[in-house]
Amino acid sequence: MKKLTKKAYLAAAFASSVVLAAAADNHMELTGKAAEYAKMSPEELAEHLIFDENGVKLDEPVQEGGTVLQRQQQDELQQICSGGGRAALTGETTQRVIALSRESTVKPEGGIKLGDWKAGEEVARSGYGFRVGHRVDDHSKRDPGGNCYACHQMAPDEPTYGTLGPSLKNFGKVRGNTEATRNYLYDVIYSPHSYFPCTHMPRFGANGVLTEKQIADVMAYLLDPESPVNQ
Amino acid sequence: MDIYRPLRFVVGVAMGLSVAVGAAADPSMRPEEILQKLIEETGSPYLTQSEQNLMMMADNPAYWTAEDGEALFYEKRGPKNASLESCDFGKGPGVLDGAYVEMPRYFADTNRVMDLESRLVYCMTTIQGFDAKDDAVKKRHGSSSDMMKLQTFIASKSNGYEWNNPLEHPMEIALRDAGEVLFNRRAGPMDFSCSTCHSQTGKRIRASVLPNVNEPTEWTKAISWPAFRVGHDNVRSSQHRVRGCYWQMRQGLSQPGSDAAIAIMSFWTDAARGQPAILPDMKR
């Protein structure tokens, strides 16, 4: 799509030089920001607009510590996964994303255990947390959630679920509460790129969105035979 | 009457831009008729998600906001006691018909690419002599703000016109391309970018169907701001949408009038090119 647009520009530049020959050249003498921007690649300009041209409010404190400035800076995985997502991955970048994801995954001390599915349901429903700007989430008043329902179907009796991610209805019933499933599920919640490089899903563990306990609780919500997910 | 339409057509053809599907531009159609036509052509789940809104669009409260904006536009205001009739939105001083669908665009007098909001700020401060700190300029949100009234009036004069922001000046092209990068740029604790939610058709967040930036027939409604947001009980602007999305993405507060915000709007307007604007729109 990008290549096509570039072609359209070339065509546009050509057409305008023919059709609007007389009028086209009076603003080609670039000055000020126009001259500055014209020297940059789209990627360089995008960074410049955020960090040097007041694109977002950079000095606002954020819940994880530091300011928006640090939050807007990309880590390597975010950088690789920004250029067209999964469709743009090569063999090499795929391997790199998987490696970065695996390296960042920390298993809980004392092994992976299931928590409380009722607490996990709260985490799955809550979209609270980490928002800054015109309305700031106060983590001292309320814990951040995982907002799983924004993208996934979970309990069959909950009709308002998102579809950006796959349905997790009957997850435990279908997969079985085995050690292999628990290991897999933990990794996917912690950093899903180990299995799905450049997936849209957040890295809830690696990015510090959910605590170890919250992850155990969400896992229980998905795997516990008593959980509404498996009814 | 729109004397620019034949010219736009010629330029459009010369630019090699063609549109396979979608409603042809017709400024005489009402917003709900434009939407209905797009629905008939596409069956898009995003466009069809609110039957109530479609039924209420004829009585869209945004019409009152636009009417207030019309009065404000022609009223002599500010320290310089001037109306906005000499403000050039890109098609000549005071020419409003079809001006908004061709924004953001480059303005030689500021050497900047400007969206409607930043152009209004410029005209209100230079022509009318308002200070940027005056409420008339500073208050950007809510149906009762001068800014929303004026934006809704001016944008409504582009109802039914095809989105067609110029990509001729190097700065227009540079910002449109940087806007695409920003749209796809993942950052923050959730790793989100705009394209996380807006690169597929028919997907939902909870019960809300999301518009796809790659489907111009859906995307035209997505970018048809100002729109009355039923859930907010207020008319909202493009910048309000950008701010809200950055908030949901857990990224920093998007700055109104910044080149980053204008870059995103340049990209998103280009993505709806050739499709008719629905103005004012009504959204959930």
Image (cartoon, coloured by chain):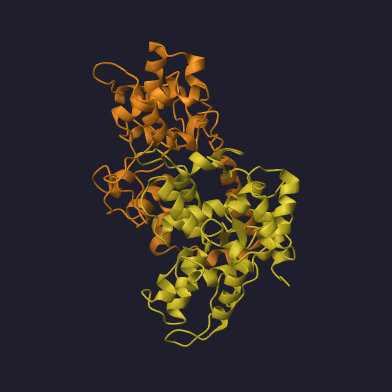
Chain colours: A orange, B yellow
Residue at (56, 36) in percent of width and height: A159
Give the image location of residue B36, x and y in percent: 73, 53
Give the image location of residue A37, x and y in percent: 41, 55
Residue A199 visible:
yes
Quadrant of residue B27 within the rendered picture:
bottom right
Q: Is residue A201 left or right of residue A130?
A: right
Q: Is residue B168 left or right of residue A42?
A: right
**Residue A132 vertical position relative to residue B87 in the rendered view, above or below:** above
Quadrant of residue B208 within the rendered picture:
top right
Q: Is residue B45 left or right of residue B133?
A: right
**Residue A105 vertical position relative to residue A30 in the rendered view, above or below:** above
Give the image location of residue A123, x and y in percent: 39, 34
Give the image location of residue A222, x and y in percent: 44, 23
Residue A188 visible:
no
Residue at (46, 37) in percent of width and height: A83
Quadrant of residue A140 within the rendered picture:
top left
What quarter of the picture does the N terminus of chain B occupy? bottom right
**Viewer-closest of B150 and A123:** A123
Residue at (71, 70) in percent of width and height: B2
Residue that protrudes farthest toward the bottom in the picture:
B81
**Residue B284 vertical position relative to residue A154 in the rendered view, above or below:** below
Residue at (62, 53) in percent of width and height: B221
**Viewer-closest of A165 and A55:** A165
Q: How many marks?
A: 0
Residue that protrudes farthest toward the front in the picture:
A226
